[in-house]
Structure formats: structure tokens, C-alpha cells
Amino acid sequence: MREFLEQSIQPYFNYWVYVILMMIGLWATIAKNNLIKKLIGMSIFQTAIILFYVSVGVKKDSKIPIIPHQVEEHHAAEDGNHAGGHGEHGAKRVTEKHVIEPDKFANPLPHVLMLTAIVVGVSTLGVALAVVQMLFKEFGTLEEDEILAQIKTADSASLDV
Amino acid sequence: MSDQLPIIIVLAPLFGALIIGLVGSRDHRVCVPVVLVALLTSLIAVIGTLTQVLETGPVDYFVGGWEPGKMAPGVHGPVEIAKGFGIQLRVDTLNGFLLLAIAIVSIFVSIFSIRRANQEAASKTPQFYTLYLLLCVGLFGMTITGDAFNLFVLVEVTSLTSYALIAMGRNRRGTMAAFNYILMGTVGASFYLLGVGYLYLKTGSLNMEHIQEVLSANDFEIGRSKPVMVAFVLIMVGIWIKMAFFPLYGWLPNAYSYCPSTSSCLLAPLMTKISVYIMIRVMLSVFGWEWIFIEYAGWSDAVVILAVIAILAGSTLALAQRELKKMLCYLIVAEVGYMVGGAWLGDPERWGMSGAVYHILADAFMTLCLFLCAGIFAKKANATRIEDLSGMFKKMPLTMTGFVVGALAMIGIPPTCGFFSKFYLIRGGIEGGHWEFVIALIISSLVNVVLFFRIFEIAFFGAKPAEGHDHAHHHDEDDHSSNNQDPIDEPTLLEREAPLRSLIPLFGTAAIIILLGVYNGQIVEWIRLTIKP
Amino acid sequence: MKWIALIAVTLTGSLLLVGVGDFPEWGDAHSAANEGPKLESGEQIATAVSQSFLTDTDELTQVPNVVTAVLADYRGYDTMFETVVIFAAGLAIFAILRVFGGDEVKPMRAPEDDTFCEGDHSRIIIGTTCKLLIPIIQLFALYVIAHGHHSPGGGFQGGVIMGASFILLAIARDLKSALDWFSEKTFMRLASVGILIYAGFGVLCQFFERNFLDYGALKTVMFSSEQMARSYAMLGVEIGVAFTVTAIMFAIYANLSSRGELKQGL
């Protein structure tokens, strides 16, 4: 049991959580009757994807992907020590490239992508809420079955005429 | 300048939308000219790009100049740009013609929308046109992009604008349909996004070309891993929801039939077709033909059977409808079945997929033609049901002529493009050994014969419709325009007939339907340059 | 409906779990997405893009925050359309909900309450707190926008904070006084102006015979090296994003809270 936990759950814990969140969201989106609950389900569904992407970009023991300029300070210190031979050293320093170890910084790309996904989620939710308000104005209810029943009675009324 | 053409296709409508957003609310009359100028600029750019493509092969455009392999100036000397660094736009013969179709359809619909949008959107006309242009931006962008994630962003641009265009109508059933569309569309887009995430997890790139390179390396070693398979299924299901493929079509009929007619004229011909294009693009450019049809040959049989069910179900449901627009919507479901089935036939000469791409073009114009007619009927004669169309041949002969061309194309009568697309699809079906698909195509064509000849019969022989829907005051300005028809023997024809701003797009579309049919050989040959290199 | 949902959920869940089995472990710095895809034999066939982003950003743009550089430069085309998505959402909500004119709605509070900082005491507390807080929030928003190169932040985040300050004003007093500050015409225009700034930077590069959004072309205009030109242009672009986001966040709130009448908020 312990072995199973350590080998298949622990390293993939984030992925398991995201799958479960996604299933909860999908269930609410399809099965719930209240339109607002459906929207909440939709939001959970989208958030699960964000969790997935961010988990992909994680590196253990890494920092946020902000790389401070270290080169200048380093050279400034050197400048003070070697006042002579300035030209030679200076030429060397310009061509010297600061080496960055990418393993120490988290993967930036999933964060960029998820910023887009969050923005898209907010926009969709806003539009959906506007539509829900419109529906409430027109039907006076937010329960899907009641709305469908109203549409059905209106349909049969128009067919009789 | 000519190397900037691909981006101008997308930018022109974007700037048009922004200009309307800035000055449109002050004066509504500025909207239509801006829309037309923006879309015409796009059209010219598309034509320019397409000629380049036909002369020299695929055109690539790297936004931000991040071209892989190029040396970019860094602080300490040049840096070589890695693959997939920036976002790539790519125009080849596969999407070039689609761009052309989008440009032409959107121009026709914008001509059709003059005045009509004012009545349908009331004081929100500038917002309507801004959304309209943003929808065009999204469609152009989806078609032109070569980046898997950029595609998602543009899918969302199109989705959000189309939700708004559908919900703008003052029909409460349309609002409910828009809500369902939002839920389904978001779930579909999320599935696509998740699929791209799985691909990213396995390949570390978002550029379509680069992904394919990684997947196919060393005889599909990475391509055979489980996450890639799951990614493929997720992406396909996501796109199928977006295109209303058979079990997932629930949102489409209500959404398209209860929205304002200008919106439905733009959405119905383009949205589902561009989704089909995306499916084909993903199949060809991301996973590759070999991966789908040789590594996982069993899948294609299952999808073709789904497509067959889609065709039969769409046709049957269309037969049961009494409303013209709804009937057309179910026909779209059937047509989506044609295209998905065709793309998945997997015949070695790839006729099925070529036929599917050609059918995207053909179907865009056929659907546009029929929806334009439906919009005209609903407006001028207040006819939304099929039985309301009685006597239409006499009442509106010109519109009815356009309708006949569209209907014949839908059935598949020779000079129109509908015949040739079915011909290529059937050829693919026979060569791929999918007889069930061939039979379904023929049955569906027979159903279309029944559907449309029933309408022709009502429109030709039916009783004269009841008086009382007099809309004579709507076309005061068009009375003096000539219609190439002899107005002497029918003095009231101009009053009964649709205004010129509706007839120009209708006849333009009808002409394109026939032209597309006449030049089918050449067009399919060009399309096959990309599909079967 | 429940049965369809059950089937859909089980299918999706099992499909996703099938994939999870073959994933790299959580936090693996050598996974395909973080370092580059590898074959079974251990041969690495390509470098992951993010690896190049991390190593080259300092060289190419002089921006310490790699996320900002990717967002506003390398994948700036995406970000532009992200802003367009927000703009489209604002327009969509306007198009769906907004009703013009209509009957004068009954104010939820008594009219004499409308005078700020007078009347009952709880209003004094709320009003004074907001008076103190809103400038600080706005200042912080500007900091987040302007400092996006060096610390987490940027146009979207700063724009949302800025929009929130207006929303706070609308909640604490009423929608009308917030609209006096930031009228409907202003925010709908501001949203367009934001994208116009973004796309304008891109088109400006085209005038220097470079590709769209190739900020390096602006070095002659900005009197700086190509790398610093990229850095400055990113700031400009972020400001454009912030305009649109501020405007649309407030527009969404204003329309949703007043059912499109823009008269009486919550």
C-alpha cells in the first residue's frame, strides 16, 4: 500500500487532483439543473486545466523565472580592482555572455499560456452571466427544466394557432 | 510590402473593428463603409498571398521576426533563434482557398446586412459591426495560424463574438440556445486546450511543424506514447463539439435558427466549416497522415461509422422539420458528417480528404446561398415555415432562382460544386473501401431531393399566400434600381422582390457555386498540392 | 440527463487517467516540456522552447522577468488576441444586456443617503476608508503595470487592480458616482484605445520594414539599442493591455450589476 502511494500517487498527485477536479466540473456542467451551478461547474472545469498546465512547468527546487542582471555588478567590482589594462579587459567583458542555468528557474511558458486561459475563462464567464441575466429577465427562473417547460408550452401554443 | 501580406489579412478587420469601436457610436453610418473597406483589404491581401503560394509554394510569416535559425542581435553578439520560439503564420494551398472563401462570404454578408443590421440590432449597430469584424478576425486568424496554442486563443475570439451575435437577437429561445452554446463551446475549447497541453508535455513545443517533427522522430517513438494518443482524442473531441459532429450537435440547430438572420448568414456557412478545416489541419500538420492512418488504422473505421450516422441522422431530422432555417441547420449536421467522413476515409490516394476540403469551400457557399434566401423570405414575406413559401416563384422569382441554385448544389446536380464534391468523396469512399459511407452519401442526396423538391412544389404550385405582410415601405431607395429583369410586364415585381443589397450577395454566391463547380479540377489539383505532396 | 453526465464524466476521467500513467514525474526538471523531448535511448531530439526562453531572454531583450518577455514579445501575437478576447467580452456583454433609457428604477437606498460621508455612521466609515484606499489601490496598480519587467505583474494584473478600484467605488457609494468618474463612453473608447496602442506598436515596426510586433525595429525611434527598444516597447504594449483590461473589467461589473441599465448598481 505504502509502496503504491509512493510510486504511483505521490509523483503524480497534481495530475490526479486535476483529473478529479475536471470530472467534478464536467458533472456539474452537464447534470446540474440550475444555470448558475452549471457555470460554476464550467469554471471548475477550466481551472482544472490551469492546474494541469502549471504542474507541467514545475521544476523541483527552482525559483520563479525572473533572472536578475548579475553581469554588470560583477564587472563593476572587477573594474575597481584592475584600473590598468582597461581596454583589453573591457573588450573581453563585452563578449562574455552570462551563463544561465535553466534548471534553476521554473518553466515560464505554461504561466504565459495560463494567463491567456485565465483571461479567456473570465471573459467567457462574464458573457455567460450576462446571458443568464437575460434568461432570468425573460423566463423569471434559473432552473433549466422550468425554462424548457416554458419553451415547450410556447411551442405547442404557436402550433395550435 | 508583399511579404507583409499574411498579417494584413488579420490586421485589416482588427483595425476596422477598433475604428468602429472608437467612432461608431457617434455616427452609425460610418460602420458599413469601414466594414467593407476592412474586408476588401483582407480580400486583396488574401488574393496576393494566394498568388504567391501558387507561384512559389507555402508562405511563412513569423510574427515578431522570430524566425527559427535566424540570428537575432543579442547584447553580447548574435543569438540563434530556436525552433518554435515565436508564432508562425502559414499559408498554403489548403488554407489559402479557405481564406478566400471567408473573405468573400464575409463581404457578401456585410452587403446583405446593410439596413437589416440597423433593424435587428437597433441602437447597438456599432457594437454589432465591431463584433462582426472581430469574428472575421478570429476566423482569418484560426485559418492562417501555424501555432497550436494561438489557434486556441483565436477559437475563443470567434466563440465569444458568436455567442454575442446569437444572443443579441430578441428571441428568448435564442438566448437559451446561446447559453447552451456557451457551455458546449467552452467544454469543446477546453478539451482542445487540454489536448495541446498533453502534446506540450510530450514535445515541449507549441509550433505545429515542430510538434510533428518531434512526434515522428525515430519511427514515431514519442508519437506512440499514451499521452499523445490521449491528446489526439481530446483535440478531436474538442473540435467535434465545435463543429457539431454527430453525437455532439445538440447546440447547433437552435443557436443558428433563432438568431438574427445576418448573424446566422455569417455563422452558419463559416463556423462549422472552419472547425472542419482545423480538424484536417491538426490531422495533417500536427499528427501527420502516417500516424493516423497507418499507426492507428482502426480509428478511421470508427470515425467513418460515426460520420455515416451523422449523415443519416442529420438528413432524417431535416425531413422532420417544418421551419426552413431549422431544416437547413440539420442539413449542416449532415454536411459536417460528409466532411468528417471524407477526411477520415484514409484512402491511399487521399481523394477523400481532398474531397472534404473542396466540400468545405462548396458547402460554405451553398449554405450561405440558402441562408441568404431564408433571411430574405423571413424578412420580405414573413415566411419562416416551409408551407409559408407557397407561391414564392411568382412572388419573388429572383430570390427563388438563387434558392434553386443553392438547393441544386445541395442535392448535387452537375454544373454546381455540390456534385463534384460528392464525386470526390465517393471516389475516396470507393478507393478506401468504405462502402457504408458511399451508400450514406447517396441516401442523403436522395433525402435532399425529397426535401428541396417538396419546397419547389409548394413554392411553384402552392396557393397564393395570405395578404397582410406588406413591407413595401422597406425598399423605397431601391425602387429605381434595375434588376436586369424586364420590369414592364411585371410592374410590381420590384416591390415584391428583395432589395438590391440582398440580391447582389445572393447572385454573387450563386455565381460562385457554379464557377466553383466548373473549375473544380483545377482547384482540387491545387488543394492536393498540400494534402498529398 | 444524469446518465449522460455519468457516462461522459466516466469516459473523460478514464481517458485522462490513461494518459497520466505515462507522465513525467511532478517537478522533473528534465522532462520533455522543461528540457526537451528525449527518446528511449536517452538521445534528446530537440530543445524545449522554454529552455531557450530562459537562456536567451536576458541577451535578446534585457528583461529580467522571462514571463513578461514571452508574453509581450515572443508570443505577443497571442497576447494581442487575448486582449481582443477581453474587448470582445466587454462588447458582448454590452450587446446582450445593455438597455437604453427605460423606466427610472427605484433607488435601493433612500435618496438622502446619496450624499457621501453624511447621514448614517456606517457610511462615514465606508466612505472614508474608500477615500483613503482607492488612491493607494490605483497607485499600486500603476506600479504593477510599470514594474512588470522586474517582478511578477504586467498589464493584465495591473489592469484588473485598476478596474477593481473603480468597482470598489461603485460598491461603496453607488454606480452613478463611479460612472461620473469613468463614464460609459470613456470606458468603451478606452478599451479600443488599448488594443490600438498594442496593434499600433506592431504596425509601427512594419513601417521600419520588419515583421509585425518585431519591436527591435523601434530602436531608431526610442534612441536605444535593439534590446532596450524591445524592453521599452513591451512596457508600451503592457500599458495598452492595462487600458483595455481596466475599461472592460469595470464595464462587465457595471453592466452585470445594473442589469444593463447603468443606473443603480448593487
Image (cartoon, grey):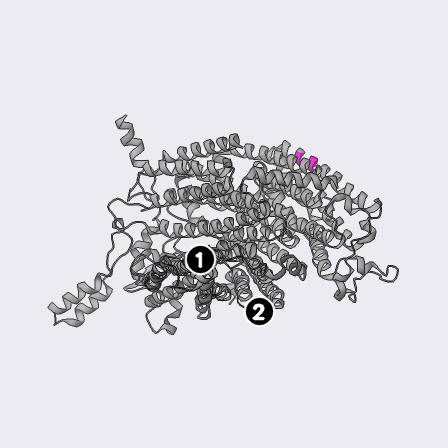
Residue at 19 percent across and 69 percent down: it is A90
Which chain does the residue under circle 2 lie in? Answer: B
Q: Quadrant of residue B484?
A: bottom right
CB under 8 Å between discs 1 and 2: no
Q: CA distance from mark 1 to mark 2?
A: 23 Å
Does residue B425 lie above or below C78 as drawn? above
Q: Please tell me whether residue B441 belongs to the stretch shown in magenta.
A: yes
The answer to whether one can see residue B90 in this image is: no
Percent x, y for residue B49? 55, 60
Residue at 77 percent across and 66 percent down: it is B481
Percent x, y for residue B55? 56, 59
Percent x, y for residue C186? 48, 66
Q: Residues within 10 Å of mark 2 (few under 14, many from 20)?
A: few
- Mark 2 residue type: Arg
Q: Please tell me whether residue B304 belongs to the stretch shown in magenta.
A: no
B439 or B117, which lies in front? B117
Which chain does the residue under circle 1 lie in? Answer: C
Write the start and end of the magenta stretch as one range. B440-444
B20 or B121, which lies in front? B121
Percent x, y for residue C165? 38, 60
State whether the magenta stretch is mostly helix, strand or loop.
helix
Relative to residue B455, is residue B262 drawn left or right? left
- Secondary structure beneath dot 1 equals helix
Mark 2 = which residue?
B26
The answer to whether one can see residue C240 in this image is: yes
B169 or B144, which lies in front? B169
Q: Residues within 10 Å of mark 1 (few under 14, many from 20)?
A: many
Mark 1 = which residue?
C249
